[in-house]
Image (cartoon, rainbow, N blue to C red):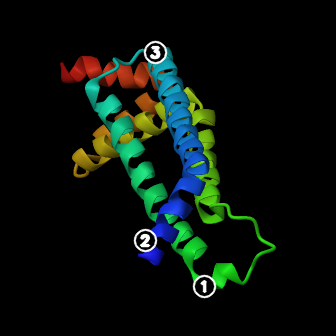
Amino acid sequence: METWGKIASCIIAQAGYLSFMYLVIVFLVAMDLWSGVRKAKKRGEARMSFGYRRTIDKLAKYFNTIFVVAVVDLVFLISPIYEGLTVIPAFPYITAIGVIFIGFIEFKSIQEKAEDKLRFKSTSMLAGKIIANKDDISKIVEEIMSYMNTSDKEYTKKDKKAGA
C-alpha cells in the first residue's frame, strides 16, 4: 500500500507541470493549424476535413508520446535512484525535453513557406507526368518545358483544369 501512496503523491505533485505541458502541445498544434489554414488560403486551396483530421491525428500522437515519456519520468521519480538524488528537484525533465522537441517540430512547420509547399507539389506533379509518359520522350520534353515556362501556381492550376 505504501508504494501506491507514493505513486499517487508523485502523480499529484507532477500534475500541474504535466497539465501545463499538455496545454503547450495543444497551443502549438493550434498555431500550426492556424498557420496551415492561412497557407492553404494563400495558395487558393480548399480547406477540407482531411487536413483537420490530420491535425487531430497529430495531436493524438503527440499526447500518446508525451504520456509514455511522462510515465518514464514518474517511474524515475518514485524509484529508489531518485531518493538518493535529493539535490535534483522533482520535475518531469524527460517530458519537458519531449515537449521542447515537439515545439521545434511545430515551429518548423509554421515557418515553412506556402510557396515551398506549392513548389513541392508542382515538382511532384511533373515527376508523375514524366513517369506516366516514360515511353514518349517528346511528351516528357514538352512537359518539362511547360513546367519551366510557368509558375508553380499556374502549373498546378493547369493540371487541375486538365484533370477536370
Query: Residue placed at 48% from the left, 56% from the top?
Result: 66
Specify whether residue 133 is in view. Answer: no
Q: Amino acid at mark 2?
A: Trp
At which x and y percent is residue 145?
A: 44, 33
Q: CA distance from mark 1 to mark 3?
A: 55 Å
Q: CA distance from mark 2 to mark 3?
A: 52 Å
Note whether 89 is above or below 136 in the view shown.
below
The reply to whether dot 1 and dot 3 touch (C-beta < 8 Å) is no
On residue 4, which mark appears? Answer: 2
Quadrant of the rendered image containing residue 4: bottom left
Query: Which residue matches tag 1?
Result: 80
Question: Crowding near pointer 1: few (<14 within 10 Å), some, many (20+)?
Answer: few
Q: Nearer the viewer, mark 2 or mark 3?
A: 2
Query: Residue placed at 46% from the left, 76% from the top?
Result: 3
Query: Residue placed at 38% from the left, 25% from the top?
Result: 156
At which x and y percent is residue 28?
A: 56, 36
Taking 150 as reference, is 131 left or right? Answer: left
